[in-house]
Image (cartoon, rainbow, N blue to C red):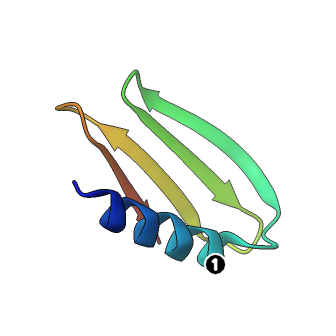
């Protein structure tokens, strides 16, 4: 993944998560972290093959 794409992804994640209150941090497996927010949205960080995949739902 290029540095520019990483920077863009970081900025987008920051904007989507700014000001949210954390409800819980969940570890479903050794390679995954889920952060659940008070408003019901969730942030996923998952790595299976070296690169971290981010998802915000």
Residue lying farthest to the front in this orientation: 3
State the SS at label 1: helix
Q: Is residue 28 above or below residue 38?
A: above
Q: Is residue 22 above or below residue 27?
A: below
At 35% from the left and 42% from the top, the residue drawn is: 46
Left or right of 26 in this view: 3: left
Observer-nearest of 18 and 36 = 18
Which residue is disc 1 drawn over?
15
Left or right of 45 in this view: 4: left
Observer-nearest of 3 and 33 = 3
Observer-nearest of 53 and 1 = 1
Residue lying farthest to the top in this orientation: 30
Task: Give the quarter of the image for residue 55.
Answer: bottom left
Q: Position of residue 26 (x, y in %)?
A: 58, 38
Q: Position of residue 43 (x, y in %)?
A: 53, 58
At 52% from the left and 31% from the top, the residue drawn is: 27
Left or right of 49 in this view: 12: right
At 60% from the left and 70% from the top, the residue drawn is: 41
Left or right of 13 in this view: 19: right
Q: Position of residue 44 (x, y in %)?
A: 46, 52
Q: Position of residue 48 (x, y in %)?
A: 22, 32
Q: Residues within 10 Å of mark 1 (few under 14, many from 20)?
A: few
At 31% from the left and 67% from the top, the residue drawn is: 5
- The quadrant of the image that shows the N terminus is bottom left
Q: Is residue 39 above or below residue 50?
A: below
Q: Is residue 38 above or below residue 28?
A: below
Residue lying farthest to the left in this orientation: 49
């Amino acid at each position: 993944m290029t540095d520019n794409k990483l920077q863009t992804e970081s900025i987008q994640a920051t904007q989507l998560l700014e000001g949210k209150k954390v409800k819980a941090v969940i570890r479903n497996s050794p390679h995954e972290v889920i952060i659940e927010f008070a408003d019901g949205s969730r942030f996923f960080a998952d790595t299976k093959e070296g690169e971290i995949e981010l998802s915000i739902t």
